């Protein structure tokens, strides 16, 4: 494969420092179950990440250090002389001791804000416990790591803490302080909890885009959960409006879907959520709202707007919908979720569970989510994302910085392994071209979005993809989404640029636009594409000069297409057919050249792009000349996506491609989406998703005017009502100086 058609290595994850290893070494600390009436055994393992995790999982090997923790953890002992300048808060040991009593006692201890002095002292007490057990060897390992180059994210020594006794798991190990700094927010020692789960498996292929199901479970009037801040934080962290070439690719790494229980869902919020979870199979499940625990059971609370009642969905009910494909990450931004709820998700095979130890303030939840997603879209490992988010909260003096607890069941680098991206310039160029430039975000059309994305990841037989519907129903959104997915999958995308003057392309100019122009220096999407069509170029030069139509292979190196216009009056009657014949021949050769990469032709807003008269009866139609040969596989692994209204498709001989069902497959050869109107709940969902995406910083202004906008989209609203509400909020944002 020619290098010019290959991926740009410079667009891969950030380069590692010179001499840095692929993965930093690791240390594992395991606290085991005690003998009856005895102390807690502690084992420390050092080595590569794989060796350490194997040891924690039970692979027989001698520990590098062993020790014990006293049965009482020394929490009832007199306070030893504290380090100079760091007096111990006498309440810290009582607070820690409360965690050992029962789950209910631990929850009670974390139900209210804890003074910073208590947290700091508790962290030093926990650190002294482990240092006393395996301290010398652990300290030596950290000193050795200081002399090594960190990895690309700053990690020198990855730390895994495996706490087996249930009572000790309730302790806030995230506060643990060694060498004078909290271990769980120190990037160089990047620490997380570890607990083996037979159901959890490393990721197979890298995931792009990363699908996120963001569940808003509380009612909109809830004053305890600052859900507006959290939604704005999440969407803002992944917004397309960030600056910088690499940052602009963030939007393409994440496909974030909002499920708002505050909207009216058919069949109720609970059943709608479970159905959405099953259909989407998200990589990340993010819950915002309330949760509760009773004994060994835990559940998430869902406010059903239709019945104005509180529903609950148990962790077991959620896990039943995973169907063997659990999320890679579960982020439970709700109070008291680190017990049974997190344990159930962990046991069901979720490799990384982030839950809250006790009650968490809304400002902490929003701040944590913002930095977490900002790092996740930059391909940071999940433990690094969590550590950086904790650090941000601590630097902002947010007392709840240690509430988020990450439990891993697979190596952090295997939760969501990084996936290569296409060249930054290619993505920028494509998305700057009309008509795709008009589309900034994706909202609504959830089922269609999932179906189209699947066409780029599954070995589907259909090669022609049709998106049709009335004007203003979101056709270009879906076409652009499909194109983005193809780019992320490494496809070669060929999209014609429409004329500057807004005119439509005749048949010849359409082929020229797809092929590119000779000597073009801006052909980022298809470098040197002109040279890949030698037979077409020679044949077109002959045809436009009025010479005998070419029925056989034109001589390579003959006359080149000089860009002369097509004169319909003097041209051969079958000029269009012959031009398409030679274009298809060279396109077939191009597909073989770039294999196994598929080739995608993009014809969006086709009624505004193509001159219909060139394909009207009795002339061959665009469907006959291009769509059908592509669909039947005559050109190899070449795909075509077409966007247009039903009338536009009929005028170009593509009307028969319309699938019989809104998400159906044509019995012959096409697959597509038919966009109809909204159901009763859809306008409100669309508006909320648009606001969350595009106006993440509207803040109090949104809260003031959102209800007015929502009144505009109450059933039986249409797309026009959504547009009106959207324009109103846009004006409000402008007046607010946003």
Image (spheres, rainbow, N blue to C red):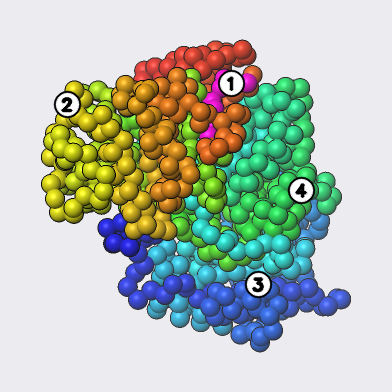
**The N terminus lies in which quarter of the figure?**
bottom left
Binning the other alpha carbons within 10 Å of mark 2 as few (below 14), some (14 to 19) or many (20 upward) gives few
Q: Which residue is mark 3?
A: 129
Q: Which residue is mark 1?
A: 678
> Disc number at residue 320?
4
Element assignment for label 1: loop
> Disc number at residue 689?
none
Q: Is residue 522 left or right of residue 678?
A: left
Disc 1 from disc 2: Cα separation: 50 Å
Q: Position of residue 433 (x, y in %)?
A: 30, 35
**Closer-to-camera residue (265/402):** 265
For the point 74% across and 74% down, which residue is it?
32
Element assignment for label 3: helix
In the rendered structure, which segment of residues is drawn in magenta? 672-679
The disc, 1 or 2, on the residue closer to the chain's N-terminal end is 2
Work out whether residue 260 can be spotted. yes
The disc, 2 or 4, on the residue closer to the chain's N-terminal end is 4
For the point 33% across and 54% down, which residue is it?
589
Q: Nearer the viewer, mark 4 or mark 1?
A: 1
Q: Nearer the viewer, mark 1 or mark 2?
A: 2
Binning the other alpha carbons within 10 Å of mark 3 as few (below 14), some (14 to 19) or many (20 upward) gives some
Q: Which residue is mark 2?
A: 570
Residue 648 falls in which quadrant of the image? Answer: top left
Vertical side of 394 occupied by 417: above or below:
below
Element assignment for label 2: loop
Q: Position of residue 604 (x, y in %)?
A: 38, 31
């Amino acid at each position: 494969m020619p290098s010019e058609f290959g991926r740009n290595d410079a667009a891969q994850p950030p380069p590692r420092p010179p001499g840095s290893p692929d993965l930093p070494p690791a240390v594992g600390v395991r606290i085991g179950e005690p003998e009856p009436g005895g102390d807690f055994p502690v084992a420390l393992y050092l080595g590569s990440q794989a060796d350490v995790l194997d040891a924690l999982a039970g692979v027989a090997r001698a520990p590098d250090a062993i020790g014990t923790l006293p049965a009482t953890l020394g929490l009832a002992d007199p306070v030893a002389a504290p380090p100079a300048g760091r007096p111990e808060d006498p309440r810290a040991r009582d607070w820690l001791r409360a965690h050992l009593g029962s789950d209910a006692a631990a929850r009670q201890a974390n139900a209210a804000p804890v003074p910073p002095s208590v947290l700091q002292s508790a962290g030093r007490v926990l650190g002294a416990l482990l240092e006393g057990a395996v301290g010398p060897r652990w300290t030596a390992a950290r000193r050795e790591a200081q002399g090594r180059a960190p990895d690309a994210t700053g990690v020198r020594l990855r730390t895994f803490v495996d706490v087996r006794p249930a009572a000790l798991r309730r302790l806030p190990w995230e506060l643990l302080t060694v060498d004078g700094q909290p271990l769980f927010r120190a990037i160089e020692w990047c620490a997380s909890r570890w607990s083996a789960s037979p159901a959890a498996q490393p990721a197979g292929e890298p995931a792009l885009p990363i699908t996120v199901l963001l569940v808003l479970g509380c009612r909109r009037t809830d004053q305890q959960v600052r859900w507006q801040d959290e939604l704005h934080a999440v969407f803002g962290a992944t917004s397309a409006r960030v600056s910088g070439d690499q940052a602009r690719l963030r939007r393409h790494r994440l496909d974030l879907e909002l499920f708002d229980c505050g909207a009216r869902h058919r069949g109720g919020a609970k059943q709608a959520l479970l159905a959405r979870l099953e259909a989407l199979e998200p990589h990340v499940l993010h819950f915002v709202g309330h949760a509760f625990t009773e004994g060994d059971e835990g559940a998430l609370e869902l406010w059903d707007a239709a019945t104005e009642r509180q529903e609950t969905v148990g962790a077991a009910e959620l896990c039943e919908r995973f169907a063997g494909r659990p999320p890679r990450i579960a982020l439970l931004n709700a109070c008291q979720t680190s017990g049974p709820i997190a344990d159930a998700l962990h046991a069901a095979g979720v490799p990384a569970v982030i839950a809250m130890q006790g009650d968490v303030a809304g400002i902490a939840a929003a701040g944590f989510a913002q930095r977490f997603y900002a790092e996740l879209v930059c391909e940071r490992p999940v433990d690094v994302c969590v550590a950086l988010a904790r650090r941000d909260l601590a630097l902002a003096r947010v007392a709840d910085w240690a509430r988020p607890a990450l439990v891993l069941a697979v190596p952090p680098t295997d939760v969501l392994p990084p996936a290569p991206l296409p060249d930054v310039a290619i993505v920028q160029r494509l998305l700057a071209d009309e008509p795709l430039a008009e589309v900034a975000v994706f909202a609504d059309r959830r089922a269609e979005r999932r179906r189209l994305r699947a066409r780029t990841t599954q070995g589907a037989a259909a090669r022609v993809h049709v998106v049709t519907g009335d004007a203003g129903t979101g056709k270009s959104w879906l076409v652009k989404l499909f194109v983005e997915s193809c780019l992320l999958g490494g496809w070669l995308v060929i999209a014609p640029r429409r004329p500057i003057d807004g005119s439509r392309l005749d048949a010849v100019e359409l082929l020229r636009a797809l092929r590119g122009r000779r000597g073009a220096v801006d052909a980022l999407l298809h470098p040197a594409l002109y040279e890949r069509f030698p037979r077409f170029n020679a044949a077109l030069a002959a045809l436009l000069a009025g010479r005998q139509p070419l029925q056989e292979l034109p001589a390579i190196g003959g006359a080149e297409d000089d860009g002369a216009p097509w004169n319909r009056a003097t041209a051969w009657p079958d000029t269009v057919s012959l031009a398409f014949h030679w274009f298809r021949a060279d396109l077939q050769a191009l597909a073989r050249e770039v294999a196994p990469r598929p080739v995608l032709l993009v014809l969006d807003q086709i009624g505004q792009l193509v001159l219909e008269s060139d394909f009207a009866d009795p002339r061959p139609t665009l469907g006959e000349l291009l769509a059908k040969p592509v669909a039947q596989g005559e050109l190899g692994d070449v795909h075509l996506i077409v966007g247009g209204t039903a009338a536009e498709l009929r005028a170009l001989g593509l009307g028969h491609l319309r699938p019989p069902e809104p998400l159906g497959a044509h019995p012959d050869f096409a697959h597509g989406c038919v966009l109809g109107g909204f159901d009763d709940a859809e306008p409100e969902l669309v508006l909320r998703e648009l606001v969350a995406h595009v106006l993440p910083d509207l803040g109090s202004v949104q809260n003031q005017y959102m209800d007015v906008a929502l009144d505009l989209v109450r059933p039986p609203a249409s797309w026009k009502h959504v547009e009106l509400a959207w324009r109103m909020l846009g004006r409000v944002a402008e007046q607010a100086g946003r």
